[in-house]
Image (cartoon, coloured by chain):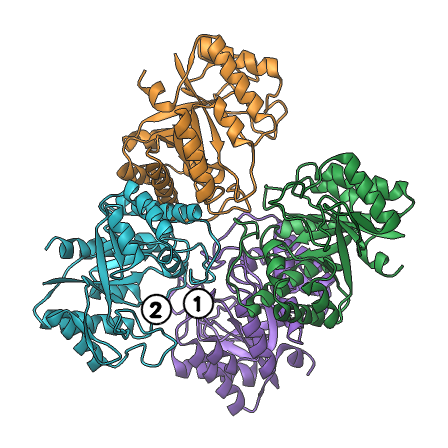
Chain colours: A green, B purple, C cyan, D orange
Amino acid sequence: MKIDVNSDMGEGFGIWQVCDDAALIDHVSSANIACGFHAGDPAIMTRMVRMAHERGVGIGAHPGFPDRQGFGRREHSYSAEEICQQVVYQFGALQGIANAEGTRIAHLSFHAAMGNQINRDPQLALQVMQVVARIDPQVIVFCMAETIIESAAREAGLPTLTLFLVDRAYQQDGRLVPRSQPGAVITEEAQVRARVRQFLDKGTVTTIEDTEITVRAGSILIHSDTPGSVELAGLVCSEIRASGHILAPAAEVLSQ
Amino acid sequence: MKIDVNSDMGEGFGIWQVCDDAALIDHVSSANIACGFHAGDPAIMTRMVRMAHERGVGIGAHPGFPDRQGFGRREHSYSAEEICQQVVYQFGALQGIANAEGTRIAHLSFHAAMGNQINRDPQLALQVMQVVARIDPQVIVFCMAETIIESAAREAGLPTLTLFLVDRAYQQDGRLVPRSQPGAVITEEAQVRARVRQFLDKGTVTTIEDTEITVRAGSILIHSDTPGSVELAGLVCSEIRASGHILAPAAEVLSQ
Amino acid sequence: MKIDVNSDMGEGFGIWQVCDDAALIDHVSSANIACGFHAGDPAIMTRMVRMAHERGVGIGAHPGFPDRQGFGRREHSYSAEEICQQVVYQFGALQGIANAEGTRIAHLSFHAAMGNQINRDPQLALQVMQVVARIDPQVIVFCMAETIIESAAREAGLPTLTLFLVDRAYQQDGRLVPRSQPGAVITEEAQVRARVRQFLDKGTVTTIEDTEITVRAGSILIHSDTPGSVELAGLVCSEIRASGHILAPAAEVLSQ
Amino acid sequence: MKIDVNSDMGEGFGIWQVCDDAALIDHVSSANIACGFHAGDPAIMTRMVRMAHERGVGIGAHPGFPDRQGFGRREHSYSAEEICQQVVYQFGALQGIANAEGTRIAHLSFHAAMGNQINRDPQLALQVMQVVARIDPQVIVFCMAETIIESAAREAGLPTLTLFLVDRAYQQDGRLVPRSQPGAVITEEAQVRARVRQFLDKGTVTTIEDTEITVRAGSILIHSDTPGSVELAGLVCSEIRASGHILAPAAEVLSQ
């Protein structure tokens, strides 16, 4: 089975960076590249696109709110139309850079507050997906399963790839345990390995209530901004290979 | 004969604006739309693209340096690669918006200091044109005749359209009289009308030395940020029509 | 009786401007100067401080949210501490410029969404006022009468000056008629004159329900971003003089 | 003898940072705090001021060009007046924050390209120093000995403290060996220790030509953005203490 591993990348600005992108990219098959609003700039975006292209890593647009100081994590009262315009502008900018480097955008993954806001509002989500579909009807939308974004993407005719969060505890209803609760984040290596193996072998995750639920996912998300993200990604990749699966970008996962 | 009239547009930011874009657009056939670095933002760009598309006005990328406070007029020590990346990012962003509105970019016109810097450096100019050609090999580059930008665009295989500045005095060598010299800017209506008529009828301009020289140009540039720009554009259009010529966007001028 | 007239000023950015500050400043006694976050920049601020200082116009800090594209009118989820820091930073920056010009800040007036957010939350309002009082315990806080900001300023030991909005209709409860309702904004010159005269002579305003209520105010606010603001300010000043009152900055109004 | 150790600090933005400020601050007596233009924001500035104030570390304004993407290292064609305004705005903003925290700015140290530009132009340097002196005539200007900035500060009546760069090789003429040349940066621990000891004991440095020249300096500058800066600062402090000298902020060094 082909499985994708993705991570947010290029989330620096000028001399600043969030993680060691050059190290992390060797352990992912899809790179969600910040597009210059919450993070990223033309130089970083070009560097990331080049690195991804050279390695056969899928290039993804990772648009966020235009709030560098808040890293796109703060809520803002943007109208639906403004959010559509922000997505389009950033997607286009990255597409320009990808084209200049002889490649193209493969997928789309929303950042933080922008993603949360879109995922709360079915009408906004549909509006965003429809405008994206007008620019590129083949772009693969990354999302959690059974979410508003997934429904909207499908309604707009866009392919989707759903995510498994290997370092976050799940509830029995399939949702993530909120970060505010104990046990929400899984850091122990053996436990992470076991979760990856269980997901790959059985397509399930053991919840915080100690029940086993099905996880519908084609990509494993690595949070690049947590300490040890490079090691975590390396570990996930080694489990994928050890269990006989194949690391592959989103498009290959969808077409298998 | 078909002739284009172009102007820089959408050069506001948020609530601020430079001129009455909605009035000016009725008197141009090509709109050079600011792309969010020296001016413009996703909302203004969307509005401008929509207005241009509805009226059959050619949509142009008008990239500048990322310096809103200086309106892209200040020189900065960017490297050649940075300038290429700035052009690509802005071009792509506007292309995204154009695609979302069901249209595409027709031409490219550089803003102020960015244009000056590119036009001083043949190697930089070629590098910029080559990267633009990789994104869109059909985009028409607006430039003055016999300039570094014109040569570079041709070398990169891009079509060009050269400009006539109706409100600026020319020297016998074909260059503009610098703004610092008396008589550099022509504001009197009758004189502007006469210059348009002479250019359309004979393809010439009378220089400040009172000689007549040939002007090789397919588009008349209106400076939108000078007072009375809307009236000037209206006057130019009325002269074009009165003299039996046809106002047409760049692509039509080139293919006549 | 001394009465103040104030207006938001210096709300441009780079080459952009909202109104003709140089004309408006001749009709006010207090200038609320944007501090570089929602509008304004070091050059504009310096120019405004210089103009105000030369004319004996009171210099006011007019801080807003760091959102130039939204002109500080959009709500953002900033924490109380962040808002305090934003106020302090902007106040200090303007104080620096005032000091460099040989003068100082006389008053403080919050802009748009920042003002609304502070005025909704008594705890935040007190926190802001206390931090302002630590920088300058004499700065006069401009506010509407009977508001959370007024109470907080008093509790923090700061002097206050309350506002009369001459171009906005009042309700019987003393609040403004919301802009969304008909009759909310008064534009007819005779009516504005009559309202100024009534306020100066009797200290009252006739409400939209046609009753007369007391207005406790020491300053008349002119919205600089509405068309005709310069004329409106001129008209208010002429009424003040015609009725034997004296136009004077906030500090003089308070000490009369 | 009292000797100061200073470093540029708070040079992050939002979630990004350049070095571990919380660790570094324990090894300096003066902190040059970025003021929100090339780096820093109100939250970071407040955090830095608080940390410095708690530890008795001198608070310094560290203004730079308004160019976060370029980290203030790129040259820009700002006019002399613009640069003065940029310095004043940033100085005032940090002074506001310092006042809000019950303390004040002790010194001033220019960042990168802004410092270089000021240090190349005696007239600009004097203009900057005079405007700073109007805001705070007691602020101590940090600079290299025998430079344009030192002369200008003195002419404007401002106290100065000169710097010793412990990790940079000196030429016989007292200037630094340019970074482009081999041996320009000294990284070996024993060599750094020896240089600190020689400077403290004899007030000299051994040049790259192997001659010994006098170094007139009251403060040792640690570059915070080089790897190992925290360790380097720790090492410098331990040498100061081991050799019987006292680590002290700029004001104490000047008044000894």
Residue A211 appears left or right of B184: right
Residue B198 drawn above or below residue D161:
below
State left or right for residue A203 relative to residue B27.
right
Query: Which residue is located at x 53 percent, y 14 percent?
Result: D195
Tell me if label 2 and label 1 are in contact, CB under 8 Å.
yes
Identified by mark 2, the residue type is: Asp
Q: Quadrant of residue A160?
A: bottom right
Residue A187 in view (yes/no): yes
Residue B193 location, x and y as percent? 45, 83
Please rate how many residues cluster around mark 2, counting C-alpha atoms within 10 Å: few if below 14, some from 14 to 19, many from 20. Answer: some
Instruction: Say which residue label 1 marks.
Output: B15
The quadrant the N terminus of chain C occupies is bottom left
Decide which of C200, A131 is in the foreground and name it: C200
Give residue B92's position: percent from left, percent from top: 65, 63
Horizontally, is B124 left or right of D27 in the view? right
Q: Which amino acid lies under the numbered mark 1 shown in the image of this protein?
A: Ile
Q: Is residue A69 above or below residue B234?
A: above
Q: Chain of mark 2?
A: C
State the image coordinates of residue D227 (x, y, percent, origin top left): 61, 28
Compare residues D184 and D230 and report the one nearer the observer. Answer: D230
Label 2, label 1: how far apart the Cα atoms are: 10 Å
Determine the chain carrying the residue at label 1. Answer: B
Per the image, the residue denoted by label 2 is: C225
